[in-house]
Image (cartoon, rainbow, N blue to C red):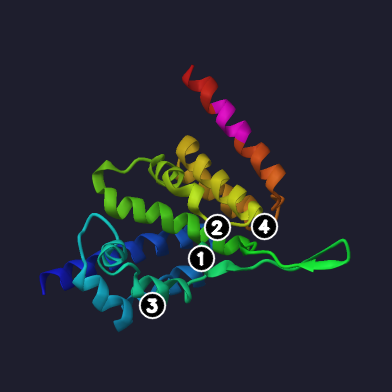
Amino acid sequence: MFKCIEHFKTINHHKKLVMESCFQVGLYRQGLLHDLSKYMPSEFLVGCKYYQGTMSPNNVERKEKGYSAAWLHHKGRNKHHLEYWIDYAIPTEVNGKLEHGGICGMKMPVCYVVEMFIDRMSASKNYQKDNYTDDGPLLYYNKGKGHYILHEDTRALLELLLVMLSLRGEEATFRFIRQRLLKRKVPYEQQKLDRAKNRLLAKGRRRTS
């Protein structure tokens, strides 16, 4: 019973953090609907059983069973997860023959990239608690980014937001999302986003030198 109560409190707190942040950037519907599938029995009961408090119960289930049934259920119902957008590549014609690509990431709509960013930030706050800093989500992302299957434009946008958070903080990043990104004033293209990210990093290095 203790694990059920603590798991319920954890997912409620996470949802509250995401909802508050989504509201700040104007994503009201996504803030309200975020992660509702976690309350379904196929996810909630697994969360109770494998609750740890310092990591996702899905990771614990995965270690025990070799896969996480709760995660497989979750990722197919929540568009802010990059795994929702993994599909087969569109076949291309080479020398008159169709070549079928492998699995790849589709380009995510900007609103779901923003929700993914907020989700990562909120998860870091939820698990790191008083040890949370604005560079925490970027550090966590960098540990596993080599394994993520992401469209190149989506990857560039997510990394720009994580770097901006780490260097400029939450308020400035939310203002950028609200006033520029969601108003389509920022090109959703890898090269331009990478240049913006590199300019931020260069400014950050100059400040610390």
In three-dimensional space, the C-alpha distance between marks 4 and 3, rounded to whole angstroms, equals: 29 Å
List x then y, in percent, for residue 196. 65, 38
Q: Amino acid at mark 2?
A: Ile
Residue contact between numbered discs 3 and 1, judged by CB atoms under 8 Å: no
At 21% from the left edge and 58% from the top edge, which residue is drawn? 53
Q: Secondary structure at mark 3?
A: helix
Q: Residue furthest bottom?
A: 41
Residue sitting nearer the eye, 190 or 64:
64
Residue contact between numbered discs 2 and 1, judged by CB atoms under 8 Å: yes
Q: Which residue is mark 2?
A: 149
Q: Which residue is mark 3?
A: 37
Most common secondary structure along the magenta stretch: helix
Lateral position of residue 204 relative to residue 106, left or right? left
At 47% from the left edge and 45% from the top edge, which residue is drawn? 171
List x then y, in percent, for residue 46. 26, 74
Q: Secondary structure at mark 1?
A: helix
Lower sequence index among marks 4 and 1: 1
Res 206 quadrant in image: top right
Is 148 included in the stretch rendered in magenta?
A: no
Query: Which stretch did the figure color magenta?
Result: 198-203
